Every structure is written in C-alpha cells, then in structure tokens.
Amino acid sequence: MKADLHIHSSFSNDGKSTVEEIMEAARTRGIGCVAIADHNTFKAFEAASEYRDIIVVPAEEISSSEGHILAYGINEEIGRGKGILETIDAIHDAGGIAVAAHPYRWWSGIGEKNVVNEFDAVEALNARSTEGSNGKARTLALNMNKPMTAGSDAHRADNVGDAYIEFSDEITDWESVIKAIMNADANTDGKHRNRADTLRYGYKSITEWIGRGFRKM
C-alpha cells in the first residue's frame, strides 16, 4: 500500500485543492493512505475521514520557531510558534509522533543542528525538495537511527502521490501506519524537485516570506 504522508489542502493558506479533490486524486493514483498535514490547522482530518476506502492519518504541519515539524497521530491541533522541544512535547502529549519535515530546506526546514534526538522520525523524501536535500535527510535519519517518512508535499491535487512510503497491504488503519513507521517497516519512493522548479519555487517562497515580514509560514 502506497501512503503519501505530506499533503496540503485548501485549509492551508497556500493549498489549492479541496479535501475532496485530494481524496479523488489519491484514489485515481492508487494511494491507499494519506496524511493531509495542513499548516497549523487540523481541520482537514474530519472531512477526509468520511472516505472509507482510503486510510487517513491525523496530521498537521506545525510552524515551530525554527521551522516546520510534521505531527502524525495527534488528537488535537498544535499551536504554532513554540520552540522545537516544546512543539515535540506538545505533539507527544496529543498522542502523536514528531517528524522533522524537509530538514534541509533553508526557508522552512529546521536545519540539521535542530534535528534533536527527541524527534521520532525524519522526512527523508519530499517531492518538493531537491535530490541533494533528500539525500542529506536520508543520511541524517540513518546516522541518527531514526525511521523515515515520505510525501509529495502536494499543494495541488495534481501532485498527490509524487512521493510516498510503501507499507504492507495488510495495514488497515492509521494506528497501524504509525506503528509501521516507527518499526521502519516500509520503503520510500518517488520524485525530487528539479532545478527549474527549484528556481521558480525559491523565488515564490522568498517573495512570500518577505511579504510575511520574514516570518516562517
């Protein structure tokens, strides 16, 4: 079973597709599990959970004071702006696991020095990160002996499934997905961002960053 564990819907301020469009794209592309990890909001989970043929992992991408952190398996929304350790503690208190999202993306990743041992896993493949950044993230996870996750980081339904992690077809619920992540019982696969897309995305992200007053999303 293929799982895309990093998707953004229109509940994110930069998401372009509705939950319905995302779920239909997942179904069309053979993605059996999704995590709609919107920026600093938990609203998509309830809407996505209405779909019974696709496993939906409760998720959120949280803007810590140092960069983005993915939370999986949480039972409530986690607030933004906290330090890394405080954010990780909040995720654990909410029953979830904390994942260092695209750690080598300089305008929103937390950076290698901030990937502390308290993280449960590292996002080792993100389709909106370059091959070099993803390679460094994978090496970091291996050196720290941490499980890996993967996702498209899709902001449009067209990109759902661009990167994914593959689990056993015997998994039938999101709790088992979390267990499989922690047991490192899966393989990652998918695309990386190419040079042309990187230049376009970099220009867009830096422009938006300046517009936000140099604050992370």
Image (cartoon, grey):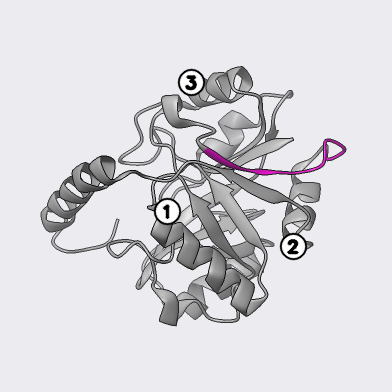
Which quarter of the figure is the N terminus placed in? top right
* Location of residue 16 in the rendering, given as x and y in whole percent from the top left corner: 34, 29
Separation of marks 1 and 2 at Cα, in angstroms: 24 Å
Residue 115 magenta-highlighted: no
Amino acid type of disc 3?
A: Glu
Q: Earlier in the sequence, mark 1 or mark 2?
A: 1
- Name the residue beneath numbered marker 1: 131
Separation of marks 3 and 2 at Cα, in angstroms: 29 Å
Q: Earlier in the sequence, mark 3 or mark 2?
A: 3
- Name the residue beneath numbered marker 3: 21
The magenta segment? 163-171
Camera-side mark, 1 or 3: 1
Amino acid type of disc 1?
A: Glu
User: Is residue 133 among the parts visible in the rendering?
Assistant: yes
Q: Residue at x 65, y 31 (%)?
A: 49
* Location of residue 165 in the rendering, given as x and y in whole percent from the top left corner: 65, 45
